[in-house]
Image (spheres, coloured by chain):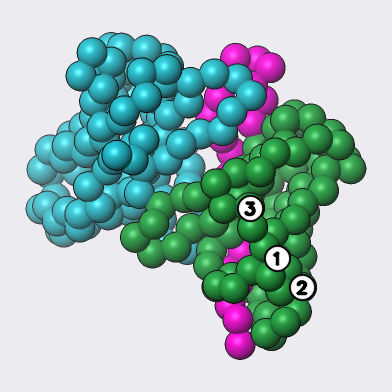
Chain colours: A green, B cyan
Amino acid sequence: DGGITQSPKYLFRKEGQNVTLSCEQNLNHDAMYWYRQDPGQGLRLIYYSQIVNDFQKGDIAEGYSVSREKKESFPLTVTSAQKNPTAFYLCASSDPGTGIYGYTFGSGTRLTVV
Amino acid sequence: QKEVEQDPGPLSVPEGAIVSLNCTYSNSAFQYFMWYRQYSRKGPELLMYTYSSGNKEDGRFTAQVDKSSKYISLFIRDSQPSDSATYLCAMIGQAGTALIFGKGTTLSVSS
């Protein structure tokens, strides 16, 4: 079955550590996205990528970095510069070239700072 | 003014009730409108997808878009306990950008 796989499901980070969240899709979608979800805040865009080797900052990119070396993969690194990283992180993909702009989401990674 | 406004609720209704969920927006460039359903600790799933103004029906769900008022709605008929979730509206104006989401409305349907 086609879909998006996020791993790990739960992640614990110590102060000062960088951690990387994995996102893989087998939908052959061109575009991929990272959102952060906090209680009462909705989904806030961190980064997005329309094609391989290209990505754009979203509304809250500070303290995060991404890469898009393969169409299927869009990993997110939460750096030590992100002061409040505890949140639920969602990866999504879409295929805007088809004129359909809806997203398919992964099941999320819950990151906790310990 | 935020681009997309959505009342977070919570909204509690008895089983069988008609539910109305709404979002307002400020950007007249938005053309595509969606509703996502998110169960606790899960990723959102696409529920309804509409283009421009008008109505779209799918089973117990009806999505309405009124671009002149910058207002979209989701109606759920004969609500069920399994409809208890957070409902997020989302919209986009053009290719090359990303969806803008409302904050989500938490719905609880009691049996």
Q: In this view, does B12 lie above or below B57?
A: below
- Look at the image and tell me in which quarter the C terminus of chain A lies: bottom right
Mark 1 → mark 2, Cα distance in angstroms = 6 Å
The mark nearer the N terminus, 3 or 2, is 2
Residue range of the region highlighted in magenta in the rendering: A94-114
Q: Was residue A8 drawn as part of the magenta stretch in this picture?
A: no
Q: Is residue B11 left or right of residue A36?
A: left
Q: In this view, does B57 lie above or below A33?
A: above
Please say if the residues under marks 1 and 2 sit with CB atoms less than 8 Å apart: yes
Residue kind at label 2, given as amino acid type: Asn
The mark nearer the N terminus, 1 or 2, is 2
Mark 1 → mark 3, Cα distance in angstroms = 10 Å
Say which element carries label 2. Answer: loop
Q: In this view, does B88 lie above or below B9?
A: above
Residue under pointer 2: A18
Give the chain of mark 3.
A
Please say if the residues under marks 3 and 2 sit with CB atoms less than 8 Å apart: no
Please say if the residues under marks 1 and 3 sit with CB atoms less than 8 Å apart: no
Residue A61 tag number: 3
Residue under pointer 1: A78
